[in-house]
Amino acid sequence: QFNGTVLVAERGKVIYKKGIGLANMEWDIPNQPDTKFRLGSITKQFTSMLILQLVDQGKLKLDGKITDYLPDYPKKTGDRITFHDLLTHTSGIPGYTEFPRFFQDMSRDPSTPDSFVKLFADSALLFEPGSKFSYSNSGYFLLGFLIEKITGKPYEQVLRENILTPLNMASTGYDHHGTILKKRAGAYEKEGSGFRNAAYLDMSLPYSAGSLYST
């Protein structure tokens, strides 16, 4: 049932790599080892690395509060939530992908980080920050916005300058729907025993929580 690409390395040596299934199911184009896929939430690992680079540079502190860097963020929650809480999904901020009718009513419309953060900034916390774990796309979206505020650069530019270019990750980037991207796989959803084309999702919404592609 697997459809994708596999690479296995042992002690730094690639011992197996193969594309399995189809990158485009309508044209029967097979997956290859260099097929580009949407990474979804693996994007969060890149975002957390950017945050820790800023910690290393002395530009923020893990125990710093949201309002230390975003003075306009609601103080009733922003004064209590730390970067560590955001990184570890213990902030209590409800995930926007769980909002009622998010995928039906909001997921197709482009937004800016500034305006999108306002959709969940006033939400009541699910619990006291640091007391529980609850996976939150909102928390990682907010981390991307904080990266922009602290560096004065777009998230995508910081990502490219601090990770992708230094590591020569030429097949990885921010997924823009309008860009002609060679060897990009189509997007599909399981439907029973088969597949269907995935619904359109504007990639300004996954943002720093899920908008990267890679091989």
Image: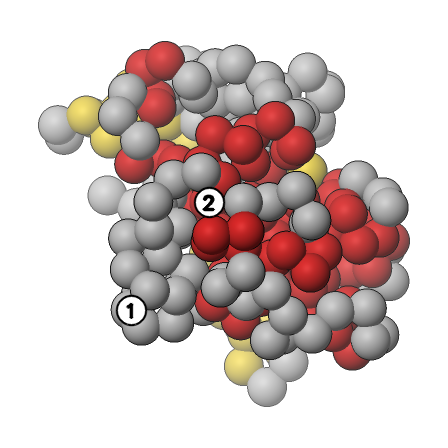
Question: Which residue has dot 1 on it?
Answer: 132
Crowding around mark 1 (Cα neighbors within 10 Å: few <14, some 14 to 19, many 20+) is some
Residue 29 point in image, percent of width and height: 49, 25
Which quadrant of the figure has residue 167? bottom right
Per the rendering, the mark at residue 138 is 2
* Residue 188 in view (yes/no): yes
- Percent across and percent down for residue 25 are 40, 21
Q: Amino acid at mark 2?
A: Ser
Nearest the viewer among 107 and 116 is: 116
The answer to whether 205 is drawn above or below residue 198 in the figure is below
Residue type (three-letter) at the residue carrying disc 1: Lys
Report whether 128 appears left or right of 191: right
Calculate the distance from the C-alpha at mark 1 to the C-alpha at mark 2.
16 Å
Q: Which mark is residue 1?
A: none
Q: Residue at x 82, y 76 (%)?
A: 58
- Residue 108, placed above or below residue 91: above
| Secondary-structure class at tag 1 | loop
| Viewer-side residue, 140 vs 69 | 69
Residue at point 31% right, 72% down?
Answer: 131
Residue projecting furthest to the bottom: 11
| In this rendering, position of residue 171 left or right of residue 119 | right
Which mark sits nearer the N-terminus, 1 or 2?
Answer: 1
